[in-house]
């Protein structure tokens, strides 16, 4: 573990913009999360804001309040937000400066790099702290091209794709990996986003910070390295965006370059238009057509996982029954019901023996 950290959500803790924070709150092996900094929700319980079985992490209105209350040295401030356009708002910079002056390194997953902002870079140097820009591209000399070595990987590789961005693909991927390990299986997750790295996953790369010519090779390299070094029984690949999302088309890399053996397709029934296209707008195609498109790549959709946000219990039940009947594919609500039944199905398909009882 790298050290103690607090997470900045800046009045957005209850929104999709804070999906980085939500992932870290659910659990990370890289950081020990001590507090959330959010002036709008200070003093409230995370469970009341987000629902679900979250750990009780205090929410403070400022860096100073966190320092005075947590009683431990704080090593990092993590910017727990994905800002529209990837640019850090100007009103966030004073908070970052306060953390630096207090001796904290700053972890930033935005497309805008803190190290490229002179006043922030100079302040960090003055106070001898690090600016960790997670999305800063690797030198091209360190990147890999696709070689075909992926054909040597015999482990079942399951891609967690989705019909849109920001609908919980990474969370479902993490749930499957963690639950499989709890059952005694050797399971690994290939992260492809900044939050996956922050959670402490060992294998992967930041897809949207990688030069396009090297995405296929970096994905293959992560999969081959994972298989060689850990001999896993299952590999779950974290998908990004969606196959037909005009804001950022993504997904075919996992099916072709990553040679996925199967897909778990995440969908949010309450969302009608692609995320951030509401003013245009661009309607999300039908779930049936997305399954058909994946099949055209030669890959089977093994299950549908649903994000139930915005649905009543009756609506959720109706969607689950309708999709299962229409598609002939098992449907699950991983956030509400867990993933044990889904994992049991995967174990049956790939003839894997579960070593422990479901927990």
Image: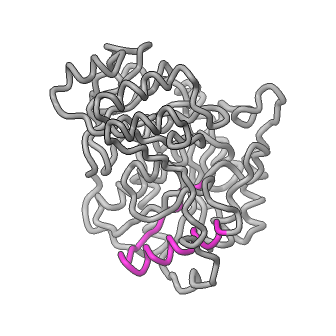
Residue at 68% x, 32% y: name it. Answer: 271
Q: Nearer the viewer, residue 234 or 204?
A: 204
Residue 23's place in the image compared with 277, above or below, is: below
Find out whether residue 316 is within the magenta segment.
no
Q: Nearer the viewer, residue 298 or 20?
A: 20
Number of numbered labels in the structure image: 0
Q: Quadrant of residue 218?
A: bottom right
Q: What stretch is highlighted in magenta?
A: 214-239
Q: Can residue 239 be seen in this view?
A: yes
On the image, the x and y values in percent for residue 329 come to: 62, 56
On the image, the x and y values in percent for residue 229 come to: 37, 78
Residue at 43% x, 73% y: name it. Answer: 226
Say left or right for 192 vs 280: left
On the image, the x and y values in percent for residue 18 come to: 50, 31
Residue 26's place in the image compared with 38, above or below, is: below
Say left or right for 149 vs 49: right
Q: What is the image's colouring?
A: one colour
Q: Can residue 320 be seen in this view?
A: no
Q: Nearer the viewer, residue 132 or 305?
A: 132
Main secondary structure along the magenta-highlighted residues: helix
On the image, the x and y values in percent for residue 349 come to: 50, 71
Find out whether residue 219 is within the magenta segment.
yes
Q: Quadrant of residue 338?
A: top left
Residue at 82% x, 30% y: name it. Answer: 281
Residue 45's place in the image compared with 251, above or below, is: above
Say left or right for 177 vs 262: left
């Amino acid at each position: 573990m790298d050290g103690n950290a607090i997470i900045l959500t800046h009045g957005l803790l209850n929104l999709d913009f804070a999906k980085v924070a939500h992932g870290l709150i659910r659990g990370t092996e890289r950081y020990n999360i001590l507090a959330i900094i959010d002036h709008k929700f200070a003093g409230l319980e995370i469970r009341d804001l987000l629902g679900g079985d979250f750990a009780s992490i205090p929410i403070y209105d400022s860096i100073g309040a966190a320092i005075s209350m947590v009683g431990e040295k704080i090593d990092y401030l993590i910017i727990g937000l994905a800002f529209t356009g990837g640019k850090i708002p100007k009103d966030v910079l004073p908070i970052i400066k306060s953390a630096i002056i207090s001796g904290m390194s700053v972890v930033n997953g935005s497309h805008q790099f803190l190290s490229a902002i002179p006043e922030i870079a100079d302040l960090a140097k003055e106070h001898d702290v690090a600016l960790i820009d997670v999305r800063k591209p690797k030198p091209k000399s360190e990147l890999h091209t696709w070689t075909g070595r992926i054909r040597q990987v015999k482990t079942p590789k399951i891609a967690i794709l989705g019909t849109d961005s920001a609908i919980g693909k990474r969370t479902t991927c993490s749930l499957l990996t963690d639950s499989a390990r709890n059952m005694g299986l050797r399971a690994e997750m290939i992260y492809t986003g900044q939050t996956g790295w922050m959670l402490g996953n060992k294998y992967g790369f930041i897809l949207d910070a990688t030069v396009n010519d090297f995405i296929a090779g970096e994905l293959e390299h992560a999969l081959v390295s994972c298989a060689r070094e850990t001999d896993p029984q299952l590999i779950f690949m974290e998908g990004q965006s969606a196959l037909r999302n005009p804001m950022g088309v993504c997904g075919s890399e996992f099916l072709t370059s990553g040679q996925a053996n199967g897909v778990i397709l995440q969908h949010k029934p309450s969302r009608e238009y692609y995320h951030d296209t509401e003013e245009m707008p661009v309607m999300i195609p039908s779930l049936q057509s997305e399954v058909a498109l994946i099949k055209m790549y030669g890959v089977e959709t093994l299950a549908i996982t649903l994000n139930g946000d915005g649905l009543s219990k009756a609506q959720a039940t109706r969607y689950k029954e309708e999709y299962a009947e229409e598609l002939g594919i098992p449907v699950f609500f991983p956030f509400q019901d867990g993933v044990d039944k889904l994992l049991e199905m995967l174990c049956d398909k790939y003839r894997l023996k579960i070593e422990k009882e479901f927990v």
